[in-house]
Amino acid sequence: MKTPTNFDVTESNMIRASLMQHAEQINAYHQTAETAAVETIRAAVMAGKLLMEAKAMCKHGEWQNWLKKNCIVS
């Protein structure tokens, strides 16, 4: 079995440090994505709730025109 040299130990430490940095960045990006997903769902639910309220306020036959004129939803 080969005895590690100073270079081997230093290189191993650098790789370990690099892997730790990667793990920190991976975890940070994952957390950001998870938070964004939750906020996206929350925003979609709120938009849907407001759309239902607005529809209930419209007179019969006015909803489609109001929606097209005032909202950017499809």
Image (cartoon, grey):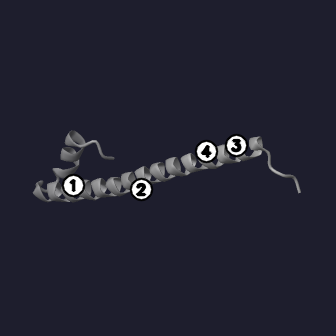
Which dot, 3 or 1, sits closer to the camera? 3
Which dot, 2 or 3, sits closer to the camera? 3
| Position of the N terminus by quadrant | bottom right
Which dot, 1 or 4, sits closer to the camera? 4
Q: Are marks 2 and 3 in contact (CB under 8 Å)?
A: no
- Amino acid type shown at disc 2: Glu
Sequence-first tag of 3 and 1? 3
Work out whether residue 44 or residue 13 is closer to the camera in this orientation and state it: 13
Q: Residues within 10 Å of mark 2 (few under 14, many from 20)?
A: few
Q: Residues within 10 Å of mark 3 (few under 14, many from 20)?
A: few
Name the residue carrying label 2.
34
Kindly state the secondary structure of the residue where label 4 is placed: helix
Sequence-first tag of 1 and 4? 4
Question: Residue 10 has which mark?
Answer: 3
Name the residue carrying label 1.
51
Kindly state the secondary structure of the residue where label 1 is placed: helix
Left/right placement of residue 6 relative to residue 35 reads right
- Amino acid type shown at disc 1: Leu
Name the residue carrying label 4.
18
Disc 1/disc 4 C-alpha distance (Å)? 49 Å
Kindly state the secondary structure of the residue where label 3 is placed: helix
Disc 4/disc 2 C-alpha distance (Å)? 24 Å
